[in-house]
Amino acid sequence: MRSRNLLEAFRFAFAGLWYTLCTQRNMRIHLAIAGAVTAVGIWLELSAERWAIIVLTSGLVLVTEMTNTVIENLVDLICPEYHPLAKVVKDVMAGTVVLAAVISVIVGLLIIGPPLRSKLAG
């Protein structure tokens, strides 16, 4: 299926985003956490540089979650029955999401921690 024009390509892309949001519980969890971090960042009046880092790390988590969805569906399409290598592919891809999330939490604590501590102390 190939898009005939740019508008149709964007429609397909948003359909993919919507599919992931509707079918993947973890995507909704990641978005809820990103929303909470955004609210705290607004309250802390973060600088543009800090926002850029938050957006990049949050985006990394969302992109890996969507890639995980693609890989899981592709593996299921190619190999509908259990296969040990299919399990490895799915497990490694899920591990990338966990790794991205852990990195995002660490970066978030480094970025938000100090101004949050200052705001709560004073």
Image (cartoon, rainbow, N blue to C red):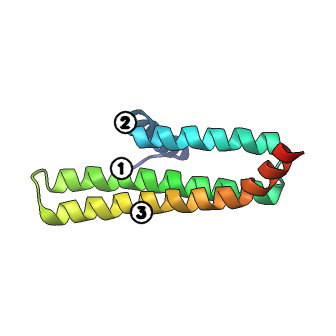
Q: In which quarter of the image is the C terminus?
A: top right
Residue 118 in picture, x, y percent from top left? 85, 51
Q: Is mark 1 on a helix, strand or loop?
A: helix
Which residue occupies 82% across, 44% down?
Answer: 120
> Mark 1: which amino acid?
Thr
Q: In which quarter of the image is residue 92?
A: bottom left
Q: Which residue is the site of mark 3?
A: 96
Rendering quarter of residue 114: bottom right
Q: Which label number is shown at residue 93?
A: none
Residue under pointer 2: 23
Toward the front, the furthest residue is 121
Regarding residue 16, the answer to whether it shows in the image is no
Q: Residues within 10 Å of mark 1 (few under 14, many from 20)?
A: some
Task: Give the mark nearer the N terminus: 1 vs 2.
Answer: 2
Give the residue drawn at x 66%, y 56%.
Answer: 108
- Residue 46 position in % (x across, y down): 81, 50
